[in-house]
Amino acid sequence: MKRTPHLLAIQSHVVFGHAGNGAAVFPMQRLGVNVWPLNTVQFSNHTQYGQWTGEVLAPTQIPALVDGIAAIGELGQCDAVLSGYLGSAAQGRAILEVVARIKQANPQALYLCDPVMGHPQKGCIVAPEVSQFLLEEAAAVADYLCPNQLELDSFAGRRPESLADCVAMARTLLQRGPRAVLVKHLDYPGKPADAFEALLVSAEACWHLSRPLLAFPRQPVGVGDLTSGLFLARLLLGDGPRDAFEFSAAAVHEVLLETQACASYELQLVRAQDRIAHPRVKFEAVAL
């Protein structure tokens, strides 16, 4: 029997709705990955509602919880670390210590960093120190980096002028250390208004993918968290990067179709669970 992968997911969690681990854990489990959720913050709901309650996990708790896993002899079973929303830069540095420890226990383990830098206009709040940590420290350690367009712009220090410029910005980011960069959401002059586009760039290849942009009164939160989680899960299950890229795009589209049909602001993960595992659609990643 093929071994089931194990993944440590270190990011935010919301009690109500779906963001951070609340958007990624169940879909990854539904695909067949054992997920160990470690919540950097626990909030009542995501911050784009404009109000929330909850607290940030003390940075010292991150290595302490991993110590507990090591103490029962299970740390070497971890095949990957996924990090997302951080409550502080100190949490980020604690995560990098954990990544180094896991890679020592399992040299084949992967680290995917989803560099959440926030979007104040949408109500997604991230401390400036966190963005600085991601720019200066995390990118050099990550095997896979999954920014959106705003985060790619922050890494590059400028806005893109074209699709080709987005590719160039991602290729420059590869020089910081990642083996591949997945830009989850492209935005550049001339992009078709009815398309949702993404890029996957490595030293060997560049793939561009487009799917329909579905209309919502308010775009659901957690789509990026879901995308990163599905991409990493499929890598652990044996997909190559291009196949994982195509699968994650198809599965996310299925979730959004169900969410749209329910006229919901929150992702309809439970209702869409079979379609997450077995998407009915496929979007081809085209080599650039």
Image (spheres, rainbow, N blue to C red):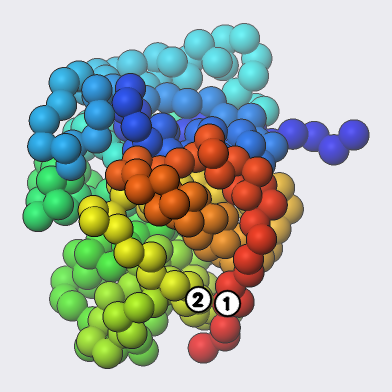
Q: For mark 1, what is the residue?
A: 285
Measured as percent of width and height from the top left, residue 172 is found at: 35, 76
* Labelled pair 2, 1 in contact (Cβ < 8 Å): yes
In the rendered view, does 45 fall on the left or right side of 98?
Answer: left
In the rendered view, does 214 fall on the left or right side of 271?
Answer: left
Closest to the observer, 197 or 193: 193
Q: Residues within 10 Å of mark 2 (few under 14, many from 20)?
A: many
Q: Residue at x 24, y 35 (%)?
A: 46
Q: Residue at x 13, y 46 (%)?
A: 123
The quadrant of the rendering that contains the N terminus is: top right
Measured as percent of width and height from the top left, residue 73 is found at: 65, 14
Q: Amino acid at mark 1?
A: Ala
In the rendered view, does 253 fall on the left or right side of 20?
Answer: right
Q: Is residue 236 visible?
A: no
Compared to 192, does 105 lie above or below? Answer: above
Closest to the observer, 183 or 195: 195
Q: Does dot 2 land on a helix, a strand or a loop?
A: strand
Closest to the observer, 219 or 181: 219
Measured as percent of width and height from the top left, residue 160 is found at: 23, 82
Compared to 191, does 120 lie above or below? Answer: above
Q: For mark 2, what is the residue?
A: 209
Q: Amino acid at mark 2?
A: Leu
Q: Quadrant of residue 148?
A: bottom left
Closest to the observer, 55 or 156: 55
Q: Quadrant of residue 23?
A: top left
Spatial CA distance of label 2 from label 1 is 5 Å
Q: Residues within 10 Å of mark 1 (few under 14, many from 20)?
A: some
